[in-house]
């Protein structure tokens, strides 16, 4: 059995619990109690290293802007490519050393209190970390761009660039407030170890520490270089020459005329039985790097995926629950009762509200069974998160809250960070108050475009404040993040129905501000591990957020204005890449929860009312695990069951598909279980370095392919570039329902 430290460890260990009731000091930890952290993070620090340098600001700003542009550019494509901060982390190393050799080392204003130099010496690891923090701001997605895309492209309504910028900025910055409130709970405790940071920490050490090559082996630098070159060269195959490697659905090849076989075997439009993608972008596209996921979390995701995809979905489909056979077995489209695509524009009135009479005339909206079930899974994951944190962490949270203002026992990293000035609470609170005021102004003054009233803003902020801590605990210990998107849509959809933009604005302020807070906290933990002064971290995060927001919106606006029929799949050719899969799901959600409203879909006026029972299922599931741990304390494996992660495993589907999950689980098993157990030395030395190398090699080759071949429209048309080869997987199987290119039943 893996080390128990891999599991969602308590916020306080036994020694800390006793300290909360006693003032006697406890001996300090020499290293982190988390095995992966102890093996990866250095316990040393050099406070004399310069941090706020000229080259840090230049390289950081450029990295943030470039990654923001590239990620938004690729976000609208059929196979979205997420270029992580790992790429910038590697690319800036030679540039940093070049600037250290070439920029003047002249001291300006010498002898005054404002004395400074543009070149304080060699490019050091702390500068490098701050550059990466900048890059992290541009490496994620700016979720509020979905609002702009939905309104401009799908609804074809008016939203100005200025209003769009207000929404993007306020959404991104709101998370600073929640991060400031909860950093003492989610950054300082050793148990909150944020597994995803191990990749970057390992890479920093490989790039900056002089390491002697082991006899008969490779240093981490050498290993990274070899893996990077291999990843770079290999991606030419799935990225251009042989794209079928993205989803090897071999069952479809054996049964080319069978709808059933292709429904079972398709990795993109079916259940994905036996499918695998030999492509790192397929593996890491939606769930992140499996090499950074603890095995217990990977196992929970695998169990949840199997339960939903291979048990519940087949049962619901073949028993024709909710007319399942009338629709594709896996789809995010919106349908009429006869299986035709629903004409959404026909049910919108001139005020951009629901036309009830037109909706009743057209008939109720239907979803594929899998799509409706993913909403049920979202309901269950929410209540499971609350129940899990209450049962397994409630006592620790209370004790930590009670002792928050008293001296506490610290691990080595918290002790080393205590020498630096902390960010004052009022900085965070000031940003929070000003941002909420700006949000209320935007929603009230531009209500004709945003539709959300002032009380909706305050309600959304209340939800984000309530959920940041429990979801933060799950993320900080498992590398998986249950989302608030469904519950925010559900609540505002009942309270304020018929207004799609109000619904998605509420979702973004309630859900994404929490998600952004977790991003800031993750970065704070990275700075915690690398011993970056907190105030310096804060400055980099704020500036990086502003740069990313401006570049993301500018890029999206440019693409929407210049690419004909972007995101409109019905008007695009089959080989056109600008299909916007994630934006389609976002738009569908705005129709379901905002325009039509949950009462007409999941309530007493709707078809899917029974889906609400998932709320109860999610609340009960962690209770069963908790009882099992008490009844069978000798069975250690029970402690590894994390119901929020297990139940919410398929939360990324759609737009994620079966092949993304099967490939991710396979790689996660090989890394987190096989290698971790049987080659622990190799795991400690190379695992996280390999993850960074795969990310970086793929990103550089993908960008090269696009600018060298994609912009020129040079493509290869042969059977190896048929992504899935399962053209019948989306066919309905209900008797009498016809679809183009499908056999009749």
Image (cartoon, grey):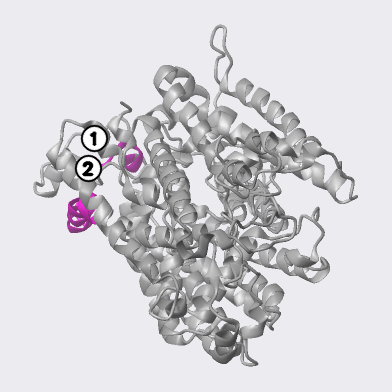
* CB within 8 Å, label 1 to label 2: yes
Q: CA distance from mark 1 to mark 2?
A: 7 Å
Residue that badge 1 annotates: 28
State the image coordinates of residue 198 (x, y, percent, origin top left).
Answer: 47, 36
- The answer to whether 229 is drawn above or below residue 470 in the figure is above
Answer left or right for 7 relative to 49: left
Name the chief secondary structure element in magenta.
helix
Quadrant of the image occupied by residue 91: top right
Residue under label 2, please give it.
Answer: 409
Is residue 187 left or right of 97 when viewed as pictured? left
Q: Verify whether residue 397 appears in magenta.
A: yes
Query: Picture coordinates of residue 351 (x, y %)?
Result: 61, 92
Q: Quadrant of residue 726?
A: top right
**Label 1 secondary element:** loop
> Residue 79: where, in percent of width, then height?
69, 50
Magenta region, residue range: 390-415
Q: Quadrant of the N terminus?
A: top left
Using the rendered image of the protein, determine whether residue 144 is visible from the camera's viewpoint. no
User: Image quadrant of residue 612?
Assistant: bottom left
In the rendered image, residue 630 lying in the magenta stretch gets the answer no
Front-lying residue, 210 or 576: 576
Q: Earlier in the sequence, mark 1 or mark 2?
A: 1
Q: Residue at x 33, y 43 (%)?
A: 414
Q: Secondary structure at mark 2?
A: loop
At a point 71% along the width and 55% down the height, the residue shown is 742
């Amino acid at each position: 059995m893996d080390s128990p430290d891999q599991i969602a460890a308590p916020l306080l260990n036994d020694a800390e619990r006793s300290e909360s009731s006693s003032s006697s000091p406890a001996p300090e930890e020499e290293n982190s109690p988390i095995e992966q952290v102890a093996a990866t993070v250095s316990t040393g620090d050099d406070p004399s290293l310069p941090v706020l340098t000229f080259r840090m600001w230049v390289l950081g700003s450029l990295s943030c802007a470039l990654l923001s542009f590239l990620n938004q550019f690729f976000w609208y494509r059929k196979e979205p490519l997420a270029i992580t901060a790992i790429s910038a982390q590697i690319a800036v190393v030679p540039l940093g050393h070049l600037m250290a050799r070439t920029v003047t080392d002249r001291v300006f204003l010498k002898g005054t209190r404002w004395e400074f130099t543009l070149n304080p010496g060699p490019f050091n690891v702390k500068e490098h970390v701050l550059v990466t923090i900048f890059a992290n701001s541009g490496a994620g997605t700016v979720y509020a761009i979905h609002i702009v895309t939905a309104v401009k492209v799908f609804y074809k309504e008016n939203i100005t660039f200025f209003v769009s910028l207000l929404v993007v900025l306020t959404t991104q910055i709101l998370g600073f407030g929640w991060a400031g409130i909860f950093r003492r709970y989610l950054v300082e405790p050793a148990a909150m170890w944020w597994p995803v940071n191990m990749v970057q920490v390992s890479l920093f050490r490989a790039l900056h520490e002089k390491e002697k090559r082991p006899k008969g082996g490779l240093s981490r630098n050498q290993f990274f270089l070899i893996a990077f070159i291999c990843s770079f060269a290999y991606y030419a195959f799935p990225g251009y020459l042989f794209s079928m490697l993205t989803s090897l659905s071999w069952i479809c090849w054996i049964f080319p005329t069978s709808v059933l076989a292709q429904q079972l075997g398709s990795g993109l439009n079916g259940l994905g039985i036996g499918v695998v993608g030999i492509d790192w972008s397929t593996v890491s596209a939606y769930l992140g790097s499996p090499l950074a996921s603890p095995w217990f979390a990977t196992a929970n995701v695998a169990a949840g995926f199997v339960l939903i995809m291979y048990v519940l979905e087949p049962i619901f489909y073949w028993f024709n629950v909710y007319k399942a056979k009338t629709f594709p077995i896996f789809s995010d489209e919106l349908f009429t009762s006869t299986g035709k695509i629903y004409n959404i524009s026909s049910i919108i009135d001139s005020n951009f509200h629901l036309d009830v009479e037109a909706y009743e005339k057209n008939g109720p909206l239907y979803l594929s069974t899998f799509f409706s079930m993913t909403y049920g899974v979202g309901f269950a994951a929410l209540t499971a998160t609350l129940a899990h944190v209450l049962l397994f962490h409630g006592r620790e949270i209370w004790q930590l809250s009670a002792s928050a203002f008293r001296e506490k026992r610290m691990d080595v990293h918290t002790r080393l960070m205590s020498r630096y000035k902390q960010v004052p609470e009022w900085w965070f609170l000031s940003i929070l108050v000003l941002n909420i005021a700006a949000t209320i102004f935007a929603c009230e003054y531009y209500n004709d475009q945003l539709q959300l009233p002032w009380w909706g803003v305050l309600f959304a902020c209340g939800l984000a404040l309530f959920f940041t801590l429990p979801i933060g605990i799950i993320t900080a210990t498992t590398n998986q993040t249950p989302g608030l998107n469904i519950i925010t849509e559900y609540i505002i959809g009942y309270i304020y129905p018929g207004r799609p933009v109000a619904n998605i604005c509420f979702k973004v302020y309630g859900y994404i501000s929490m998600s952004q807070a977790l991003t800031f906290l993750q970065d704070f933990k990275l700075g915690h591990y690398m011993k970056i002064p907190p105030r310096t971290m804060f400055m980099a995060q704020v500036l990086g957020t502003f740069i990313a927001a401006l570049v993301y919106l500018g890029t999206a606006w440019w693409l929407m204005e210049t690419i004909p029929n972007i995101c409109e799949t019905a008007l695009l050719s089959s080989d056109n890449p600008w299909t916007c899969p994630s934006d389609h799901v976002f738009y569908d959600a705005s129709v379901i929860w905002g325009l039509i409203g949950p009462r007409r879909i999941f309530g007493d006026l709707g078809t899917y009312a029974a889906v609400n029972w998932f709320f109860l299922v999610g609340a009960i599931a962690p209770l069963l695990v908790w009882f099992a741990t008490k009844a069978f304390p000798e069975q250690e494996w029970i402690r590894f069951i994390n119901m929020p992660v297990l139940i919410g495993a398929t939360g990324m589907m759609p737009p994620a598909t079966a092949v993304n999950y099967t490939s991710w689980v396979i790689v996660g098993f090989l890394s987190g279980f096989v290698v971790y157990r049987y080659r622990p030395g190799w795991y400690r030395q190379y695992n996280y370095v390999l993850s960074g190398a795969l990310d970086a090699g793929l990103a550089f080759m993908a960008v090269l392919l696009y600018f060298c071949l994609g912009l020129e429209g040079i493509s290869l048309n042969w059977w190896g570039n048929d992504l899935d080869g399962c053209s019948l997987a989306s066919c309905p199987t209900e008797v009498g329902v016809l679809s183009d290119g499908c056999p009749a039943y």
